[in-house]
Image: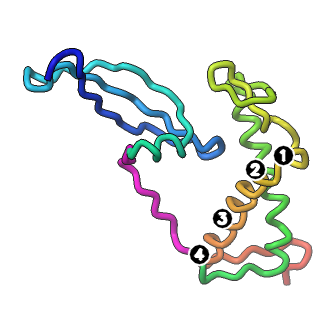
Amino acid sequence: MTASHPQYFIVTDSISPHSNSQQLTVIHCDEPNTGFEPRLISAHFLPAALVGGYGIKMKYTPNPMQTNDITLSDDLVALTELIAANVHDVWAVGRIKEGWTYGEVKDTEKKTTPCLVPYDELPESEKEYDRNTAIETLKLITKLGYKITRKDIET
């Protein structure tokens, strides 16, 4: 292999669940048969769809506990929207602490995102992500044998 045709090795470091991005580290080696001395080329956040489109395999395979067999009570279903709004607020506090600000377009370099708005102003697709987190958390708690009740109606 010549220096004009380097090999690239791509390693997935992390996934950002709220932005559906993966941080990738690209390692380059000009001549792999001569001792393999890799050097870091870049570490970027790329949309997960783009990463998957190039056939990059993740080392981590998510394996969430299956909760399809759990049906939530009406009280817990009603609670999911409150939890979803709180999940968004917790996420927003974290982004603001990291220096992110509101922007009409997400830009990881400038640290701007259109999602730094109150939960009620989010697009439905973003709300659905937070709702799913809330529902799956409640289902997991139930599946693990815990019971969630309100203090004012406990007996």
Q: Position of residue 137 (x, y in %)?
A: 66, 64
**Residue drawn at (40%, 39%), measured in percent from left and top?**
12
Q: Earlier in the sequence, mark 3 or mark 2?
A: 2
Residue that label 2 marks:
126
Residue 122 numbered mark, or none:
1
Quote the CA–CA distance across marks 2 and 4.
22 Å
Going by the numbered disc 4, the residue's amino acid type is Thr
Total of numbered circles in the picture?
A: 4
The residues bearing labels 3 and 4 have C-alpha atoms spaced at a distance of: 9 Å
SS at circle 1:
loop
Q: Nearer the viewer, residue 84 or 15?
A: 15
Q: Secondary structure beneath disc 2?
A: helix
The amino acid type of the residue labelled 1 equals Leu
Look at discs 1 and 4 and give the one toward the viewer: 1
Q: Nearer the viewer, mark 3 or mark 4?
A: 4
Q: Pick whichever, 73 or 15, lies toward us.
A: 15
Q: Nearer the viewer, residue 31 or 21?
A: 31
Identify residue type, mark 3.
Thr
**Element under disc 3:** helix
Mark 1 surroundings: few (<14), some (14-19) or many (≥20) residues within 10 A: some
Relative to 148, 41 lies left or right: left
| Residue, disc 4 | 67
Bounds of the magenta segment: 56-66
